Image (cartoon, grey):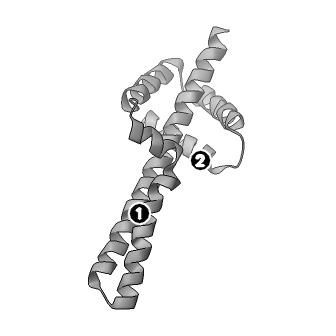
Amino acid sequence: MSQLERLIEIAEDELTEYSSKARKIEKLRRKIGLSVTKAEQQQVQTTLLAEMEPDGFRQLVAEQRQAVALPFWGIAGLGLLSAISFNEPLGIMAAIGGTIGAISLQKWGWELQARLLLLETFAEIDAQLKS
């Protein structure tokens, strides 16, 4: 497992806790400071910045993953309703496709949100070192 993947998992774990963004960054900053050298931090930060190019859709999914996935949940629900009510095999395929699409979008949004949290944490670490 690479350092980037490990840090993303740590950030995802922090996202599961109910706390403020500042508290999450503070806890992440401590964990990163203890386990990652400054050179590795710079390498991971440059890799993250290269992967997280500014893109409207990517930003939208990172900030509003549930709202973006909502139409796919609607398609899944309507497909299931159609399959049950009218005995339509196409409805089952729509339900499966909508569910897969919604779950995939939410999972991608969760990972993007963890990456953004890592970038904010690295910015906080840099700000602490400069002052």
Determine crowd level at label 2: few under 14, some 14-19, many 20+ residues with C-alpha closer than 10 A: few
Residue type of the residue flagged with mark 1? Phe
x%, y% of residue 18? 70, 49
Residue designated by label 2? 13
Under tag 1, what secondary structure? helix
x%, y% of residue 60? 46, 42
Quarter of the N terminus within the rendering: top left
Q: Which mark is residue 89?
A: none
x%, y% of residue 58? 41, 40
Question: Residue at left 52%, top 55%?
Answer: 66
Q: CA distance from mark 1 to mark 2?
A: 26 Å
Number of on-image labels: 2
Question: Residue at left 50%, top 23%?
Answer: 41
Placement of 89 over or under 67, stated as above or below? below
Quarter of the C terminus within the rendering: top right
Q: Is residue 24 left or right of residue 44?
A: right
* Residue furthest out toward the top: 131
Q: Nearer the viewer, residue 92 or 116?
A: 92
Instruction: Name the quadrant containing residue 104.
Output: bottom left
Asked if residue 82 can be seen in this view, the reply is: yes
